[in-house]
Structures are given as C-alpha cells and as structure tokens.
Amino acid sequence: MMPFGERLRVAVETHGRLCVGIDPHASLLAEWGLGDDPTGLEAFADTVIRAAAGSVAVVKPQVAFFERHGSRGIAVLERVIRRAREAGILVIADAKRGDIGSTLAGYAEAWLDSSSPLASDALTVSAYQGVGSLAPAVERAERHGAGLFVLSATSNPESARVQTALGADGHTVAALIAHDVAALGAPAAGRGEWSSVGLVVGATVPLADVGLDPEALPAVPILAPGFGHQGGRLSQLDAHYGPLAERTLASVSRSVLAAGPDGLEAAIAQHRAELAA
C-alpha cells in the first residue's frame, strides 16, 4: 500500500486541507434531535460521513465519545471507520495513545493493523515517554501503510508549562519532539514525499513561542486543531504555519457540526472556501 504520507498528499491535493471531526458530544446529539446512545452515535457519524464524502480529505473521530458507551459504542466506531474509508475519506483516529513496549504494540495493532476492526489510516499518539517509545507504532504503521500524529504543541492553555519547558540543550519539549519526528521523516523528505509521521500543533499556538522552526520540519504533515470554536481562523492558516501550511490539516468540529444535519454540507463548503481564500 502507498505510505500514509503520500496518500495524505494526494487527498489534500484533491479535496483540500480541511479535516472534519466526528465528535458526538452529548450536547450535540441533543441539538441534532438524537439520543445519547449507540443508535444516536451511529446516525450522527453516518450523517457527517455522507456530507464529507467527495469534498473533505480527512475525518477525525474523537474516540472518547464512542468509548463512553462501552462495547456498543466501540462497535459503532468500528463501523464508522470502515464506512468513512469505503467512502474514500482518510480516517485519523483521535485516541492519543501512548506507552512503551508490548503495550504500545497492542495499541498499534488495534488501530493501525489492516486486519483490525478498528483499522484507521492514522492515529494520534502521545510521546511523553519519548519519541523513541513510539517505535512499535512506527513499525506497525510502516508495515500497513498507516500514519501517526504525535502531540507536540497543543492549544489548551494548560499545555504551555510542560511543552515550553527547556531541556538541558535549551530547546523546548515541543521542539525536542518535533526534532525527533522530523528525523523519522528524513527518508521521505529525501524522496520528495510527505512523511507518514506528523505532528499535532494547535492553531492558537504561536510557533516561535513554543520553539518550533518550520524550516526544520521538511516533509512533516501537521494536524492543526483549534480552528473555529477555539479561536483559530482558517483565513490565517497560511500566515500562521508558513512553510508548513501546504502540509497542514485544518481540523474543525464544533464550527461545522453546530450547523446540524441539514446544514452540514453548506458549512463544509463555507469552511473550504474560507481555507482556500
């Protein structure tokens, strides 16, 4: 299978840089007139997939909102992932998994192995134990043509104290993670391709403030939450991310999903237009 990085590049060239979250909050389910139960989850997610098909490169199910319904919610998530991929949309499972050794290998098998019922195109992961601890997931992703997005600089205000902390070499924690992720993508960069291991960098985070140098991240794709409801503006993506902009996925959820089931397609079109402009 073509590596995830190249599949993402093709999807972005075809459909643009918008990534739509599938986030069935209890409040949104109520606004949509759906029950806060597995049946409501499935109806919600299927509506998003239908609206996104053919116009959006990526959808990002937030795993927590399915997990809270137990095994029935996970069963719905399995079907949602499969249907989105069958519709030609790349799926990033927003699970933020992270651990070491056999435990991380188990997470990787669940989310990245093509034979798994939860098989996704990519997975969000945490590298608090070091980017090297992600080796089992990196290996599994390479084997199955999947990808990873590693948390580096997130939009939540609580993150700054940790992510801007300085190491012995004077670099921030966010920059250290970014450096190691860029090293994983060096072979792809050498081939002129997009790396299959990207970074999560929030849209409300000034890159210089967290010590990130866009020029030091060739080939690295960016998953950028924080647009819309959290304050980031799609029209400012290019200026904010600079050389990274062409490889940056603008992740939106509430600002699209709040349009309701009948307004989704129009909301997606409006967001795409703002991003393109």
Image (tube, rainbow, N blue to C red):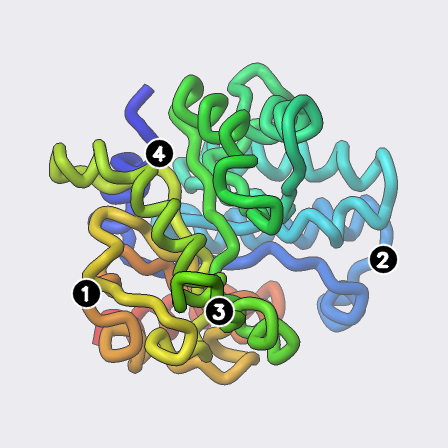
The CA span between labels 4 and 3 is: 32 Å
Q: Quadrant of residue 110?
A: top right
Residue at the spot of label 1: 243
Is mark 4 in CB contact (under 8 Å) with mark 3? no
Which percent across, then down, holds residue 15?
28, 52
In the displayed structure, would residue 106 be above or below residue 203?
Answer: above
Camera-nearest residue between 241 and 101 = 101
Q: Amino acid at mark 2?
A: Asp
Q: Say what secondary structure mark 2 lies in.
A: loop
| First in sequence: mark 1 vs mark 2 | 2
Is mark 1 in CB contact (under 8 Å) with mark 4? no
Residue at the spot of label 3: 166
Q: Amino acid at mark 3?
A: Leu
Q: Inspect this view and state whether residue 64 appears.
A: yes
Which residue reaches farthest front?
Answer: 168
* Residue lying at 37% horizontally and 71% vertically, measured from the top left: 211
In the displayed structure, would residue 46 be above or below residue 262?
Answer: above
Q: Local crowd at mark 1 within 10 Å, few (<14), some, or many (≥20)?
A: some
Which percent across, then down, holds residue 82?
56, 31
Quadrant housing the N terminus: top left
Residue at the spot of label 4: 4
The CA span between labels 4 and 2 is: 34 Å
* Residue lying at 54% horizontally and 73% vertically, measured from the top left: 155
Q: Amino acid at mark 4?
A: Phe
Residue at the spot of label 2: 36
* Residue lying at 48% horizontally and 63% vertically, measured from the top left: 167
Q: Local crowd at mark 4 within 10 Å, few (<14), some, or many (≥20)?
A: many
| First in sequence: mark 1 vs mark 4 | 4
In the displayed structure, would residue 100 be above or below residue 49?
Answer: above
| First in sequence: mark 2 vs mark 3 | 2
| First in sequence: mark 3 vs mark 1 | 3
Mark nearer the viewer, 4 or 2? 4
